Amino acid sequence: MGLDIRIPLGLIFLSIGGIMTAYGIFTYGDAALYERSLGVNLNLLWGGIMVVFGAIMFFVGKRQKWQDDPISPRPWERDPKVEPRH
């Protein structure tokens, strides 16, 4: 089956996390925005976490498609009787 939810999920988290991180960087020194969160820049913190999570999801989804390639199987899945094609 060709549908893997990790790729679009990773892209969504990458884009939203990137927007939040950029907003957190641009408003880094503004004390009035972060007064309610005890001075912690939550946009920068959670934006960075979302970017990391999105990157992991995206690359794991891409890697899984590469590993399930039926044309060139993994070394332990090869039939020892069949000679490799070069």
Image (tube, grey):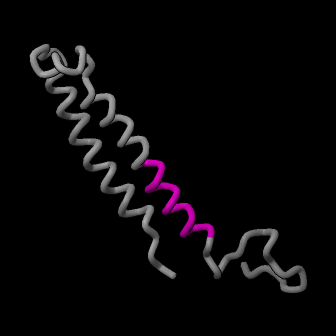
Secondary structure, magenta segment, majority class: helix
Q: Nearer the viewer, residue 38 or 18?
A: 38
Q: Position of residue 83 (x, y in %)?
A: 83, 83
Farthest-out residue, left: 32
In the depicted view, which residue is nearer to us: 19 or 72?
Answer: 19
* Nearer to the camera, 31 or 51: 31
Residue 37 vertical placement versus 6 (above, below): above
Q: Residue at x 18, y 20 (%)?
A: 36
Count of marks placed on residues: 0
Could you tell me residue 21's position as x and y percent?
Answer: 25, 34
In this rendering, the answer to whether 22 lies above or below 4 is above
Q: Quadrant of the C terminus?
A: bottom right
**Residue at the far bottom in the pictured view:** 82
**x 78%, y 79%: residue:** 84
- Asked if the stretch drawn in magenta spans residue 83, the answer is no
Specify start and end residues of the magenta stretch as a single range.
55-67
Most extreme residue toward the front is: 36
- Residue 16 position, x and y percent, is 25, 47
Asked which quadrant contains residue 25, the reply is top left
Residue 48: % across, % down: 35, 34
Q: Is residue 66 above or below residue 44?
A: below
**Residue 56 in the figure: left or right of residue 32:** right
Left or right of 46 on screen, residue 86: right
**Magenta stretch: includes residue 64:** yes
Q: Residue at 48% across / 49% down in the picture? A: 56
Determine the residue positioned at 79% across, 74% down: 77
Query: Closer to the camera, 54 or 37?
Result: 37
